[in-house]
Amino acid sequence: MGGQVLDYETKVIFRQGHEEGIEDGKVIARFEDGMSIDAIAEKSKVSVEEVKSVLKKEGLI
């Protein structure tokens, strides 16, 4: 076909969700490894509130 690759909204949303899922997984793994919430936030470059939100969603705090 040789045409232009289209970036549909659903593809963008899927990629964003996938990336967020990976980041959530990193937050959870770091917490389970004993890292403090503050350290996780700094390492992950997100706010403490975001870290807490992920951990609450997973029932870890």
Image (cartoon, rainbow, N blue to C red):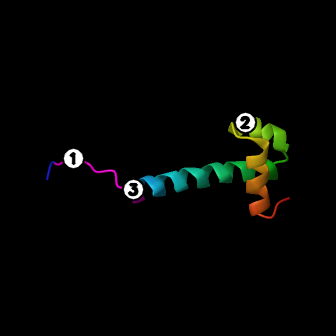
Classify residue 44 as left or right of residue 36: left
Q: Secondary structure at mark 1?
A: loop
User: In the picture, residue 60 is in which quadrant?
Assistant: bottom right
- Whether residue 1 is in magenta: the answer is no
Q: Counting other residues with Cα less than 10 Å from the Cα at mark 3, is it few (<14), some (14-19), or many (20 or more)? A: few
Give the residue pinned by disc 1: 4
What label does residue 12 carry, if any? none
Give the residue pinned by disc 3: 9
Which is more foreground, mark 1 or mark 3?
3
Q: In this picture, which residue range is highlighted in magenta?
A: 3-10
Which is more foreground, mark 3 or mark 2?
3
Amino acid type, residue under disc 1 in the picture: Gln
Q: Secondary structure at mark 3?
A: helix
Classify residue 9 as left or right of residue 39: left
Please give the count of numbered marks on the rendered protein: 3
Most prominent secondary structure in the magenta stretch? Answer: loop
Amino acid type, residue under disc 2 in the picture: Lys
Between the C-alphas of marks 3 and 2, the distance is 30 Å
Q: Say which residue appears at 17% left-offset and 48% top-offset.
A: 3
Q: Counting other residues with Cα less than 10 Å from the Cα at mark 1, is it few (<14), some (14-19), or many (20 or more)? A: few
Q: Say which residue appears at 80% left-offset and 50% top-offset.
A: 31
Q: Where is residue 6 drawn, in percent x and y?
A: 28, 51
Q: Where is residue 9 drawn, in percent x and y?
A: 39, 56
Q: Where is residue 15 drawn, in percent x and y?
A: 47, 53
Classify residue 7 as left or right of residue 18: left
Q: Say which residue appears at 72% left-offset and 36% top-offset.
A: 43
Give the residue pinned by disc 2: 43
- Mark 3 vs mark 2: which is more N-terminal? 3
Between the C-alphas of marks 2 and 1, the distance is 38 Å
Between the C-alphas of marks 1 and 3, the distance is 16 Å
Amino acid type, residue under disc 3 in the picture: Glu
Q: Counting other residues with Cα less than 10 Å from the Cα at mark 2, is it few (<14), some (14-19), or many (20 or more)? A: few
